[in-house]
Amino acid sequence: MGRSNKHVVTSTTPSLAIVQANPHPHKDVVPTEAPIVSSYNDHIRPLLDTVDKLRNLNVMQEGIQLPTIVVVGDQSSGKSSVLESLAGISLPRGQGICTRVPLVMRLQRRRSPEPEIWLEYGDKIVPTDEEHIAQTICAATDVIAGSGKGVSDTPLTLHVKKAGVPDITMVDLPGITRVPVNGQPAQPQAVTEEFLMDEIKVLEERKCIGLPNFIPRSSFLAILSQHVDGIQDKPVEFIKEIWDYIEVVLSSVITTYSDNFPQIQSSIKRAGRNLMSRTKERSVNRVIEIVEMEKLTDYTCNPDYMTSWTQKTTSQQNFINSVLHDENKPENFALPGFGDVKISHLRKYHAHLLQQAFDMKMSITSYWTIVLRRVVDNLALYLQFSVKNLVNSQFQKEIVAEMVDPRAGGGIDRMLEESPSVASKREKLKNSLKLLKESKDVVAAIVDQNSVYADR
């Protein structure tokens, strides 16, 4: 500011720089605000304030989405650095894990040169400044997540009001931890299941007299039923989503192509809704049948089943030997297609039961692949057939039935009536023709009169 010909550049939102010449080099120039900035503060700023108020009310828990930038990634991968460059503020840095709680940064541009910064968590409000933001965040993090390296899902909210920052809300999340760092609690081991225990349980519950090298069919079907129950909701949800999408498309098409027939547009839409409702219900019932049929019996003509089963059972004897006869008593066994499986819990069972359980595991694994493909293929074929039938015949029949239904108010007769817009245009044309005809007569009379005068 102290030199002549010095310019003052003031950055404003949105992305606007105001450049002024300083006629008094020894005096500070108060930057003027451009009209676009004033309009922004009058119209956009209230909307952003409203978004913040909605976020404070936790409306996102009700499924209402609010505009937010969220940075996610592996631990110590530079997420906080990205937000620092956007926000222009310093966040905690250091070795290992730095961000241990979600940090919500609410930035708001203000005209005052003095920034206003505070940290909010729980019922506490902690004022701070730009030089001590990192320390304040670290102190609050220790209160929430402890002084070690543990993480918490309780958020901190950093409010920053100062000139030059964008009006935006950003969220910095703790990194994805692959391996616990020193001082961080170890991740709990997943329970997902112990190898062969489901099969052994079912076999023991359904003990019967039979040859030792035959799997009891009731046991196989019980395991198969468990697998089917685990996925039966997914095909139903999928078919519902598909028909919801088709209903939206159909409604859009009906609206577009029935604009010329406003008298029957409501009837056509009603026909479409009724048809879609019945079709969706029928499709859901059909998909449930497709899934339930897989519980009925174990059947396939697909040669892939025997190929897969043969490959998987080649390791059976080595597996039994490792469980019962290996003097080293290994904890795990490398089983092709399954990886390292734990076997130490199986040593208390008899070889006959282990052989049956292993055979059942390989059988159900090979057969389950066939079942999934069959369900997917049947679902796709049925869906394609249903849509084709809907477009080519059912919709037309539904519209005709709606039109001839006396309860619909005489759809055919109403279709023959002119729309109000066409009737209005027709009336205007009649008036125009009448006016032009009268004008023609007036002009013709003048022409005839001039001709008479000319003859004289």
Image (tube, rainbow, N blue to C red):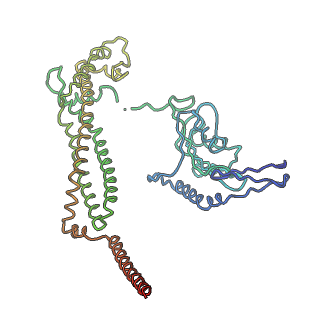
Residue 454, image x, y percentages: 44, 85
Quarter of the rendering containing residue 225: top left
Q: Which one is in front, 367 or 390? A: 390
Please give left or right for residue 357 compared with residue 112 in the image.
Answer: left
Quarter of the rendering containing residue 322: top left
Q: Residue furthest top?
A: 327
- Residue in view at x 26 percent, y 29 percent: 201
Please give left or right for residue 290 compared with residue 341 in the image.
Answer: left
Residue 417, image x, y percentages: 26, 71
Q: Which one is in front, 83 or 124? A: 83
Please give left or right for residue 418 compared with residue 165 in the image.
Answer: left
Q: Which one is in front, 432 or 163? A: 432
Please give left or right for residue 230 compared with residue 96 in the image.
Answer: left
Q: Is residue 335 above or below residue 64?
A: above
Residue 85, image x, y percentages: 63, 41
- Residue in view at x 33 percent, y 52 percent: 249
Residue 230 seen by the camera: yes
Q: Which one is in front, 375 or 317? A: 375
